[in-house]
Amino acid sequence: MATNVITNTCKLGSDRYNMFSSFLSLVKAICSLKHICQSISMSTKCPGWHMCAQSSNRSSLLQAEILIVKEYQAVYFENEIINLSQGLPISSRSSLLALNPYLDSQNVLRVGGRLQHSELSSTETNPVIVPKKSHLETLLIRNFHESVHHQGRHFPEGAIRSGGYWITGGKRRVSSYIFSCVPCRRLRGKQHNQMMADLPRDRVTHARPFSYVGVDVFGPWSIVSIKTRGGQASSKRWGVLFTCLRIRAIHIELIEEISSSAFINTLRRFVSIRGQVVEFRSDRGTNFIGATENLNMQAVFVEDGPVRSYLQQQKVSLDFSPTHASHMGGVWERMIGVIRRILDSLLMQHGQKNLTHDVF
Ligand SMILES: [Zn+2]
């Protein structure tokens, strides 16, 4: 009797399902409940529902799924089910009208559709209709969204369809679920922008070009240094970018190694060509830290024997961005991006084998 009660007539009440947060745990719970009822009614000895293989085999789980779906359909599509069971057409105002629904042999409401002659499985051609804004819908979307490892909207949508379910208004519901999904937000959330401070004085006042200069090293590029009969030896080249903080003019020097002497010589060449510099600015890149540590230069002012006198003569100071301030120095980082793009396309025409120091 208990078996008949659960499978056919008795309504467990879909409100009770609200306490479940996972579709699989709900299905397993119903499956176990049904198994216990069957054991009691048939007075058979069972080792316990959690140990019994019958309570979790595939057909039992499918039956439990159907039972749950029918509970919800009976609440949300009561009129449609009454009409269809009496062989009448559903109301023209029904939200399911476009789906051409029908009741299958187990009295489950399914999508009619136009794929009867396709080679797809029956669950895909005629998916089970799941009412929107129901707890079942949330459980299903969560289940399939997690099964595709929190991918975008199209993945859970496809998984739901191939799982044999049709959620009315599904696209919007899946999108809104993903919008509120915590792991998705952590994975793909937008960064918040913060209000930036005022630009420094040397960026926005008049002065001679290259009075205030941003410096950075970029690269390396691999070039052919020696050609022998058997092959070729390659070495690296870096670029030192000098950019005027006011007018964004740029000057590039090529260096053969990252060393203090190469850096000092580069500074000398630049100042000789472009004239007196009031202040150099740079990020706290390891290239420059190395150079300044070897030179015993302080972060703001250069204090090294031979270089100090030279730079003091020129009245130049070197100002570093603070540590971990990667948001500073956008002036030269942007320019480096532009130079890289242009250089990459230029060098592509020459090919790696022909790229010598002169060509570079
Ligand atoms: Zn997610």
Image (spheres, helix red, strand yellow):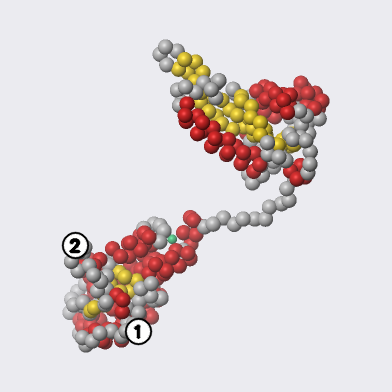
Ligand 1 under 8 Å from disc 2 Cβ: no
Examine the rendered structure and indicate whether residue 355 appears above or below residue 90: above
Q: Is residue 190 visible?
A: yes
State the separation of the CA atoms marked 2 and 1. 32 Å
Image height check: is 147 above or below 11?
above
In the foreground, 320 or 118? 118
Q: Residue at x 54, y 57 (%)?
A: 190
Quadrant containing ligand 1 reads bottom left
Between 35 and 232, the one nearer to me in the picture: 232
Residue type at tag 2 = Glu
- Identify the secondary structure beneath mark 2: loop
Residue at (80, 23) in percent of width and height: 309
Expressed as whole percent of the image width and height from the top left, the position of residue 341 reads 53, 37
Which disc, if any, is residue 93? 1
Question: Nearer the observer, disc 2 or disc 1?
Answer: 1
The three-letter amino acid code for the residue at tag 1 is: Arg
Residue at which label 2 appears: 119
